[in-house]
Image (spheres, rainbow, N blue to C red):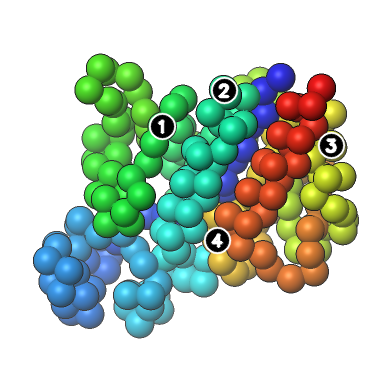
Amino acid sequence: MKVTFILAEAALEPIPSSLRKDPRIVNSCKKLGKKPDRCLLDKSLHYWAMDRLRDKEKRGRPDITYHVMLDVTSSPLYKSGLLDFFVHTYNDYVIKVGNSVRPPHAYVRFEGLILDLFEKKIIKDVNGKVLLELKRGKVKDILNEIGISSAVGFEVDGELVTYEHAAKQIISGQRVFIVGGFSTGDFSIETSSIFVKRFSLAREMLEADTVTCRLIYEIEKVLFTK
């Protein structure tokens, strides 16, 4: 029985072309020995230049995807082939993560990998196996691809439940769960309309990797003890 995890509206994107000539962006990237078209938008580095961006509070956190991807791909559930993993970005790109992917543990290499993916649209290993694939799409397009119409979503103002209860609901239902890949703000109406159940695991914003790790662990406890 497979489970699908979608990290949705992730704050993961190259520096937008509208900001690449901003002196603050140019100087920031220059200090790293890079050009603006070879950097991911990062709030910790580019905050003051992001003022004119729409939804600036939800953007510029590539580290969230980085940590979640490391945690997911190191989990027994993923390694056993029982977890499919997708990243949907704020700008409506979908990254399909293949089987047995081992992301780089150094952030600088992760950034280079993601920038290569945005440029090439596909990353393969030395044997030609597809590791990462990028295409335009929304969360609903992922669900259409896997043949599912709805999912369990996690939001601060959802029904307050335990991780164990949430995991059992995921497994007994559509077997798809969605966690936000941003640090502040809410899901778009388009994304939240997909949720057949809206759960909250705490009445405060939790780190995406913490939520992901604990949910996967609880799912493993159910699936691996059957």
Q: Are marks 4 and 2 in contact (CB under 8 Å)?
A: no
The part of the image, by quadrant, that contains residue 182 is bottom right
Residue found at x 75% / y 41%:
218
Q: Position of residue 32 (x, y in %)?
A: 17, 69
Sequence-wise, which precedes: disc 4 or disc 3? 3
Element assignment for label 1: loop
Which quarter of the rendered picture does the N terminus lie within? top right
Q: Which residue is mark 4?
A: 182
Q: Which residue is mark 1?
A: 101
> Camera-side residue: 107 or 190?
107
**Would residue 132 be found to the left or right of residue 222 on screen?**
left
Q: Amino acid at mark 1?
A: Val
Residue 67 in view (yes/no): yes
Element assignment for label 4: loop
Q: Amino acid at mark 4?
A: Phe
Q: Are marks 2 and 1 in contact (CB under 8 Å)?
A: no
Sequence-wise, which precedes: disc 2 or disc 1? 2
**Would residue 48 be found to the left or right of residue 220 on screen?**
left
Sequence-wise, which precedes: disc 3 or disc 2? 2
